[in-house]
Image: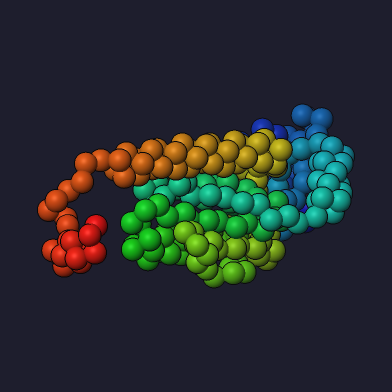
Amino acid sequence: MIRLSPIRLIGEDGEQLGVVETPDAMRMAQQAGLDLVEVVADSRPPVCKIMDYGKYKYELSKRESKSKSSGAEMKEIRLGRSIKIDPHDVQIRVDQSRRFLLAGHKVSITQRFRGREMMHKQLGEERLFQICQDLSDVAKIEMAPRAAGRSITVVLGPDKAKIESYKAKLAQEGKEAEEDLAKLEAEVAAQNAAIDAKEDSEDKDDDAKSKKKSKGPKDDRASNPVDDEIADLLGG
């Protein structure tokens, strides 16, 4: 029973219907053959939505059951093969990380370095810290950026209190967090496979260039006079 009036009303399809008196909202729900459900109780005015309450409870219990059975997993997000990644692609990975975090999963985000980029590792660290900042409304840092070989990785975990607040805000705006994790996982897997394929291709190109250079003509200008003298003395 919704005791307060007026309320902020969201329609069946998520449309914002504005602030209306509770009896009017209940009448609209009855005319549609649906229920008036309070979705954000602690806001003023409270936020209510016209929906099929039975179906809503069923979907909610199904999601909770799926979450408990699957448990939290570590999801890997890679920022391409090098620090030369387009800002738009970085944002795609931030959005993917957010969706995993909202579903209760941890996320490891890795920045790789190529060639001389290792001399500018601070650029990768700065990018990872910016991503942490972008996701600070739903996540907490579980492992600060840590270098390993030619990469730096940060691990983020879901912050339950922040996520509840974030989802309440979405509900107030008539939106819902995306739940199609199977599609998201397939998207990220394809993304990581493309990075691996590109990495293998570039490594082969580097090997070919290296072999070509080693077979090139001897550069007399690069010879060391002392080495040449020793070689003459030894009869080389």
In this rendering, would 57 be left or right of 114? Answer: right
* Image label count: 0
Residue 61 in view here: yes
Determine the residue located farthest toward the front in the rendered image. Answer: 235
Q: Residue 78 location, x and y as percent?
A: 53, 49
Which residue is pictured at 33% across the width and 63% down the height? 119
Q: Is residue 223 above or below residue 143?
A: above
Q: Residue 154 location, x and y as percent?
A: 55, 63
In this rendering, would 220 be left or right of 9? Answer: left
Which residue is pictured at 70% across the width and 47% down the height? 48
In this rendering, would 153 be left or right of 203? Answer: right
Residue nearest the observer in this picture, 109 or 214: 214
Which residue is pictured at 77% across the width and 43% down the height? 36
Which residue is pictured at 35% across the width and 57% down the height? 117
Q: Residue 57 location, x and y as percent?
A: 85, 44
Residue nearest the observer in this picture, 105 or 163: 105
Q: How is the image coloured?
A: rainbow
Residue 184 in view here: no
Residue nearest the observer in this picture, 14 or 192: 192
Q: Residue 12 location, x and y as percent?
A: 70, 34
Q: Quadrant of the C terminus?
A: bottom left
Q: For residue 56, which quarter of the picture?
A: top right
Q: Is residue 27 above or below residue 137?
A: above
Q: Is residue 25 above or below residue 131?
A: above
In this rendering, would 126 be left or right of 64? Answer: left
